[in-house]
Image (tube, rainbow, N blue to C red):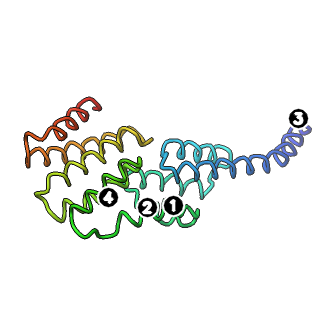
Amino acid sequence: MLVLVGLWARFGMIISPVRANLGEKYLRTGDDYLVQKKYISADLAYRKVLLLVPGDKEASKRRELVKLASNDVTKLRTFLNEKSAYNQLNLLEATESVPQDEVDAVKYSRELIERGEFQLAAIPAKTATEMDKTYRDAWLYLGIAHLKTAQFTEMPHEMRNKYLAEARRALEAAKNLDASYEPTISYLAMVDKSV
């Protein structure tokens, strides 16, 4: 029995560095996913780290960041800077710059949607709604950004439902401003189909 315990201890000493190296690989993989805003894949990679290296502080912190960023993409700023993900960081900073007017803000939101940056597209659209609460297109593009985020961003189900609710709220505001505008009606129907 003592021989078995001794062999098991030696095996543990040999396998521990292998587990740590594999954990580092999964941490890097999770970071790559997080830069891409693939929240479920990132979280899964960080969970693998914690299975291999229980109590790993970096993996635990990253899992918390995944939760925060899926709700608010601006929470990734420090992480993107640390990872030298300058393209994503520049996009984030550009979305937060104050536009000249609500029309420019909506135009930038539309451009971001066309680029597939749905979560970021909500930032200038929201700014446009704050600049002019009666600007239909500001509410429309805020709704579209939230709807597309829910449809195409990899995230937990509860976050998806939050974005769908936000899409509905914004699109209803657009509809209240112009009840007959066809794009608003079409996007509201898409929200209903996505629920």
Q: Which mark is residue 100?
A: none
Amino acid type, residue under disc 2 in the picture: Leu
Real-space CA distance between mark 2 and mark 4, rounded to the nearest whole angstrom: 11 Å
68 left or right of 161 in image: right
Label 2's element?
Answer: helix
In the rendered view of the protein, which quadrant contains the C terminus?
top left
Mark 2, residue position:
91
Q: Are marks 4 and 1 in contact (CB under 8 Å)?
A: no
Amino acid type, residue under disc 3 in the picture: Met
Label 1's element?
Answer: helix
Q: Earlier in the sequence, mark 4 or mark 1?
A: 1
Q: Earlier in the sequence, mark 1 or mark 3?
A: 3
Q: Residues within 10 Å of mark 4 (few under 14, many from 20)?
A: many
Q: Are marks 2 and 1 in contact (CB under 8 Å)?
A: yes
Q: Earlier in the sequence, mark 2 or mark 4?
A: 2
Could you say where residue 174 lies in the image, as x and y percent from the top left?
Answer: 14, 48
